[in-house]
Amino acid sequence: VVRSLSSEQWRSAITKLSSNASFISRLLLNEIPDNLEEMLDINLLPRVQIDLQTVCSCPDWGGMCKHVAGVCYQTAAELDRDPLLLFELRGLPRE
């Protein structure tokens, strides 16, 4: 589970984005600008354990089992294909 950003965080981010035409144009081209997180002052990618909670019923008790790792790799591949999915994962509907 990826923790959603708060409504307040998204309102602030959208306000900042709406004032930057170059960022909007990059997003419309399905690209995430390199310094987007810095400009928005939020972490889109999970950076701390509370942002990404995993559960698996397999008997592997290690920090991250092969099943969770597989989901992470698949998610990364989907994000490469559709970078705007990151906004959805963090709680902002695509519309």
Image (cartoon, rainbow, N blue to C red):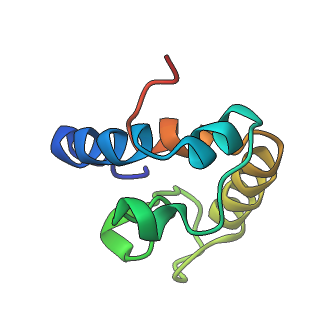
Q: Position of residue 1 (x, y in %)?
A: 43, 50
Q: In this view, does 92 lie above or below 64?
A: above
Is any part of residue 11 visible from this angle?
A: yes
Residue drawn at (38%, 37%) of the image: 91
x, y percentage for residue 39? 43, 64
| Residue 35 quadrant | bottom right
Front one among 45 and 27: 27
Task: Name the foreground residue: 59 vs 63.
Answer: 63
- 27 to the left or right of 62: right
| Residue occupying the far top of the picture | 95
Residue 81 in percent (x, y) is at 83, 42
Count of marks, rendered view: 0
Asked if residue 65 is positioned above or below residue 17 in the image, the reply reads below
Q: Which residue is located at x 37 percent, y 74 percent?
A: 49
Residue 52 seen in this snapshot: no
Taking depth in this image into account, of 91 and 13 the one nearest to the observer is 13
Q: Nearer the viewer, residue 80 or 70?
A: 80
Left or right of 10 on screen, residue 85: right
Q: Quadrant of residue 62?
A: bottom right
87 sits to left or right of 43: right
Q: Residue 74 appears at what percent x and percent y?
A: 77, 51
Which residue sits furthest bottom?
Answer: 62
- Left or right of residue 37, residue 48 in this image: left
Q: Is residue 79 above or below residue 93?
A: below
Residue at (20%, 38%) from the top-left corner? 7
